[in-house]
Every structure is written in C-alpha cells, then in structure tokens.
Amino acid sequence: MRSIPIGVIGLGNAGAPILGNLFRSNKYKLVAFDIDKNKLNDVPDNIIKAKSIKNLAEQCKVVITCLPKPEHILQAVDGEDGLLQNASTDMVWVDTSTTDFKQTQKLAKKAKMYGVSMLEATLTGGVHALQNNNMVCLAGGEKEIFENWKEVLQDAIGEVVVLCGDIGAGAIAKVVSNMLAFTNMVAASECMMIAKRAGLDLESFFDAIRVSAGNSFAWETVVPHIFNQKYEAGFTMELACKDMNLSYLLGQHLNVPLDLHMEIKKKMEKARLQYGDSEGCYVYPRTLEDELGESLSLKGWDNWGYDIKVVDGSIVVKHKNRPVSKHPQYNSKN
C-alpha cells in the first residue's frame, strides 16, 4: 500500500479530512486538487499539489472525489480534461459524494469504457467523526473491487465500511439515511419546544429521551447543537436540501409515496430561505425559536462534540465536553 499513489479531488468539509486521514496513516503517496487554489495552501508540503484534474489523474492509481453536487461530479470526471479520459491504467475511482444514483450508475458504466473501476463510498455520521477517522462508509460496487480497496476506505473514512450492494446502492442508502435524520431533526425540535413551554429542565429532558424509545442519532446530536446554537455548520442547508430533493426524485423514480418526507422537505426549504444556503443543516429549530420567541439555548455547551462507535451493528454517539449531567449514571460515560 505504501507505494500506491492516491489522489483526492475536492478539499471541502469532507475532502480535507479525508486527505488528512490518509496523510496521518503514513501509507500512501498523496496528490491533491481543488478548483479553489487557496485550499491547496493548507495542504502539507509533502503532498503533491496537482495543477489540474488531468494532471492528478495521470499520477494516481486511486482517485477519491469529494464534491458537493451531481453537476460537480460530472464536471470533474467527464470531458477531455476530466478524470476518466485521463485515467492511469487500471485506475480505481472512489466517489464519496451524495448524488443521484442513476447518474452514478451511468458514470460507472462509462468508467469501464476507460478501464476505470468505480466504488461508491458515501459518508454518514457527521463531519466531527470524519475528522477523527471515525465516520461510517456506505459503499456500493463490485464485491471483489470493494474487498481489494476496503483498507483505503478505512484509512480515509473510518473502520466501519458497509457494502450496501452494487453501484447505486451506496447513494440510495445515504439519501435514505439523510431522509430519516432530517425527519428526526424536525421532530426533536418540536419536542424540545414542548419541553421548554411546559417548564421542564431541558438538560434533564434531553437525558431522559436518550434512554427512552424516542432516542435517535438526530436526538443525540441535534439537541446539543440547539443548546449551543451552532446548528452543525459543517454541512450546509444548501446541501441538506439538495439531498432532500434527491430523496424526492428517488421516490418518484420508484413510485413510492413520500407524504411525510414532502412535509419535512417543505419545512427545510423554508428554513433555507429564511437563514440562507450556507447556514448549518440543523438550523431548522431556529424557525420555531424565532416564531414562538422562545430560546432553547443553554450555557455550558459551547465546547460540546462527539465521536461515534458501532456497537453490535448499531451506531452509538459518544458525547465529549458536555456539562456534568444531573443524572449520575451518565457522567462516567460522557
């Protein structure tokens, strides 16, 4: 592995941590590219800075794309100056982007025409986890290719890598995961406002739901962001609404009615228009706070963070730097 040249295209909220994780593994020769040349200034000197995607493609055995939208992927991989037409022999292309599964399937077929094998490596668990090489990867692709390059995915993303099926399965799993997360986010916001208006202690209420049947990944991570008013800035409302639209298109394509999803999509679009594309994806609770004139913020949560761990096949949130709980059973585990 140590001699394998790996390229990373896109150094945003996902690409920069992925490049950092690979760099810290000290296993690979690394090449980086971003259309924003300023982002290359933060790349360590012993990582090669490619002049273009074509330049990167010619140097690398494995290329990881970390791009925000389907159109950005097309721009990066298609055309005379794109990844596919300039690929090195027997290249493996790993796409971490959340995108349209039909586009992914078409690009995978096109990649084969150029001798390029494709893997999906969609990400779930939050940017905090990715920065610690502890995110979960929902993969798609041929089993043999997946097994051959699973170690790279683990070094780049995290130990837990799940092959969901053939190409397209990773995109579907990621989009559905976000559907569920954002639905739970809206529900968590409304429940917290019920607790506030009922005069409950919000920290005690948060901890009570954590050990109840109502708990979820969204509850564990959304509510602390409400407390500290940071609203998960690592993933923007523009991208969140893009993913919700991909969910809508998925339902249309498969003739599955998405009544609840459409209601959540509408609420998120309202929040995006109200607070802007670049606001964090958990900003929806602010719509309730502003509408009702009730703040859900609490002191002492400014430095809160989390890691994730998979226990018995399920994701578990491990809280960091939260205030001491009023319930003693939590404090030894936070």
Image (spheres, rainbow, N blue to C red):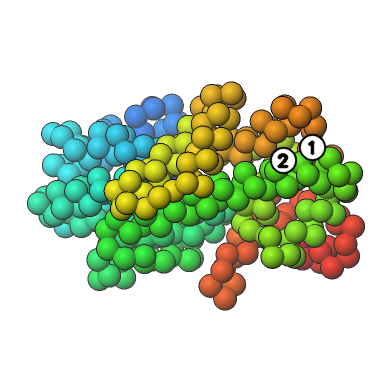
Q: Residue 297, which numbered label?
A: 1
Q: Residue 148, which numbered label?
A: none
Q: Are marks 2 and 1 in contact (CB under 8 Å)?
A: yes
Instruction: Using the rendered image of the protein, determine whether residue 15 is visible from the camera's viewpoint.
Output: no
Q: Using residue 225 as the reference point, say whether residue 158 is left or right of it.
A: left
For this rendering, which residue is in front, 193 or 322?
193
For this rendering, which residue is in front, 315 or 33?
315
Spot occupied by residue 68 in the image (x, y as percentages of width and height): 40, 38
Identify whether 218 is placed above or below 12.
below
Q: In the rendered image, which quarter contains the N terminus?
A: bottom left
Identify whether 183 is placed above or below 281.
below
- Which residue has dot 2 on it? 226
Instruction: Using the rendered image of the protein, determine whether residue 143 is visible from the camera's viewpoint.
Output: yes
For this rendering, which residue is in front, 319 or 48?
319
Identify whether 213 is placed above or below 71.
below
Label 2: how many residues lie within 10 Å, few (<14), some (14-19) or many (20+)? many
Q: Residue furthest left?
A: 113
Cα–Cα span, label 2 and label 1: 6 Å
Q: Residue furthest bottom?
A: 312
The quadrant holding residue 196 is: top right
Instruction: Inspect the image, locate mark 2, and give the three-letter code of the amino acid beneath it.
Output: Ile
Spot occupied by residue 299 in the image (x, y as percentages of width and height): 84, 39
The quadrant holding residue 230 is: top right
Instruction: Inspect the image, locate mark 1, and give the three-letter code of the amino acid beneath it.
Output: Ser
SS category of the residue bearing label 1:
loop
| Sequence-first disc among 2 and 1 | 2
